C-alpha cells in the first residue's frame, strides 16, 4: 500500500487548482472498512493518536536518558479558516504536553522586525526530544509578505533559498520536518467565515481582515503554489491535505505524523545503570519503621 506521505507529497510544479479540497485521498472506502468513511476516520484517529503518543514518549525518553538530539516539527499553513487550530487540537491532543511545544505566529512585533525573518522562528524551535507544532511559520514571509507587498520583491524572492538552507540545517541537526498545507476551497472558507460570524461561541475568531485576505484569494493561491513548489525538497517535503472535510483532514495529518515517527525507528533507551543491582536493592527494600 502506498504511504499517505507518497500520496500527498507535492513536487516542484504544484498547482493547487489540480488538487480538489473535497477529496479524501488514501482513505479506504466503505467496501473495505464496512463503515461510513467519516465514522471510520474518527475511530482511526483515536487509535493513531494512541500510537503517536507512544512514539512521542520514546522521542522524549531518548533525549532525557541518552542525549538523543532528534526532534519533530510539524508546520501547518492554510488560508484563514483552513483548520490549523482544529488540527492542532485533534492531532497534538493525544500527546504529552510536557514534550510538546506549540507556537502560533502572528504579525511580527517591533522587536522581531529588527531581525531577519528567521530570527523568531529559530527561537521557537523545539528542544531535542520535543515535538514542535507551528501554527503558521516562516512561510508567512513568502505568503502574506508577498501578497501584501510588506517587503520588496527581491527580498521575498531571496527567501525561498534561505528557507531551503535553513530547513537543511534543521534536518542535519536531527529534525524531522512535516510541512502540511491544509487546502480548503473558496466556498468552504465562506461557510466557515459565516459560521464564525453567526455562532456566538465562534465570533471571537472572526477577523474582518480575513475577508480582505479572501479578496486576494488568487494572489494567495499563486504565492502558495510558489512556496510549495520551491520549498518541497527531499529533506523537507510539503504535503497538501485536502481539508474541506475536517474528519479527513485530522485523519490525514495524524497519519502523516505517525508515518514520520515510524521512519525514525525510535525505541525506549536502555538503562545506563546496573539493572540487576538496582532490582536487588529494591527487592531488599523494607518499609521504614513508623515514628511513634
Ligand atoms: P485562523 O486561521 O483561525 O483565522 P490565524 O492563524 O489567522 O487563525 P490570527 O491570530 O487571526 O490567527 O492571525 C494571524 C495573522 O498573522 C495572519 O493574518 C497572518 O497573515 C499574520 N502573520 C503571520 N506571520 C506573519 C508575518 N511574518 N508577516 C506578516 N503577517 C504575518
Ligand atoms: Mg485569522
Image (tube, rainbow, N blue to C red):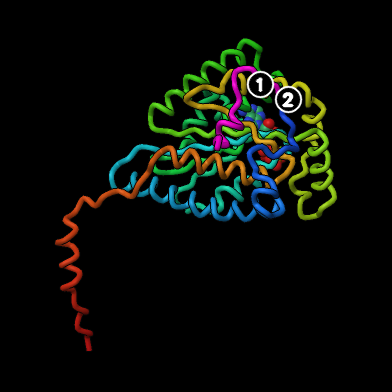
- Figure quadrant of the N terminus: top right
- Looking at the image, residue 231 sits to the left or right of residue 206; the answer is left
- Looking at the image, residue 52 sits to the left or right of residue 10; the answer is left
- Looking at the image, residue 65 sits to the left or right of residue 233; the answer is left
Which label sits on residue 14? 1
Ligand 1 placement by image quarter: top right
- Figure quadrant of the C terminus: bottom left
Is 155 in the magenta?
A: no
- Is residue 107 among what the camera can see? no
Q: Secondary structure at mark 1?
A: loop
Position of residue 185 measured from the top left corner of the image (x, y, whole percent): 77, 34
- Looking at the image, residue 187 sits to the left or right of residue 81; the answer is right
Residue furthest toward the front?
Answer: 31
Q: Which residues are magenta?
A: 1-17
In terms of image quadrants, where is residue 194? Answer: top right
Which label sits on residue 4? none
Q: Residue at x 60, y 46 (%)?
A: 88
Position of residue 139 measured from the top left corner of the image (x, y, whole percent): 60, 26
- Is residue 14 among what the camera can see? yes
Residue 115 sits above or below residue 29 on the image = above
> In front: 175, or 204?
175
Q: Which residue is mark 2?
A: 18
Q: Residue at x 55, y 39 (%)?
A: 256
Position of residue 198 measured from the top left corner of the image (x, y, whole percent): 85, 50
Position of residue 153 measured from the top left corner of the image (x, y, whole percent): 66, 12
Mark 2 surroundings: few (<14), some (14-19) or many (≥20) residues within 10 A: few
Amino acid at each position: 500500500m502506498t504511504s499517505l506521505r507518497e500520496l500527498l507529497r507535492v513536487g516542484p510544479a504544484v498547482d493547487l487548482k489540480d488538487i480538489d479540497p473535497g477529496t479524501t485521498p488514501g482513505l479506504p472506502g466503505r467496501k473495505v472498512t464496512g463503515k461510513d468513511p467519516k465514522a471510520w476516520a474518527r475511530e482511526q484517529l483515536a487509535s493513531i493518536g494512541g500510537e503517536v503518543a507512544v512514539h512521542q514518549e520514546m522521542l522524549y525518553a531518548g533525549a532525557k536518558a541518552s542525549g538523543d538530539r532528534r526532534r519533530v516539527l510539524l508546520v501547518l499553513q492554510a488560508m484563514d479558516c483552513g483548520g490549523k487550530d482544529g488540527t492542532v487540537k485533534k492531532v497534538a491532543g493525544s500527546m504529552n504536553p510536557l514534550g510538546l511545544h506549540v507556537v502560533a505566529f502572528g504579525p511580527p512585533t517591533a522587536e522581531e522586525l529588527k531581525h531577519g525573518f528567521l530570527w523568531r522562528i529559530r527561537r521557537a524551535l523545539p528542544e531535542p526530544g520535543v515535538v514542535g507544532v507551528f501554527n503558521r511559520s516562516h512561510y508567512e514571509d513568502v505568503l502574506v509578505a508577498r501578497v501584501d507587498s510588506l517587503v520588496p520583491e527581491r527580498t521575498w524572492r531571496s527567501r525561498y533559498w534561505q528557507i531551503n538552507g535553513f530547513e537543511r540545517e534543521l534536518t542535519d541537526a536531527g529534525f524531522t520536518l512535516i510541512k502540511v498545507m491544509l487546502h480548503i476551497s473558496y466556498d468552504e472558507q465562506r461557510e466557515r467565515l459565516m459560521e464564525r460570524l453567526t455562532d456566538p461561541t465562534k465570533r471571537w475568531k472572526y477577523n474582518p481582515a480575513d475577508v480582505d485576505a479572501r479578496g486576494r484569494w488568487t494572489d494567495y493561491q499563486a504565492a502558495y503554489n510558489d512556496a510549495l513548489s520551491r520549498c518541497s525538497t527531499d529533506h523537507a517535503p510539503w504535503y497538501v491535505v485536502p481539508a474541506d472535510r475536517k474528519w479527513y483532514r485530522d485523519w490525514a495529518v495524524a497519519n502523516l505524523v505517525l508515518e514520520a515517527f515510524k521512519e525514525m525507528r525510535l525505541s525506549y533507551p536502555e538503562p545506563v545503570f546496573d539493572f540487576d543491582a538496582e532490582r536487588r536493592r529494591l527487592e531488599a527494600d523494607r518499609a521504614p519503621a513508623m515514628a511513634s
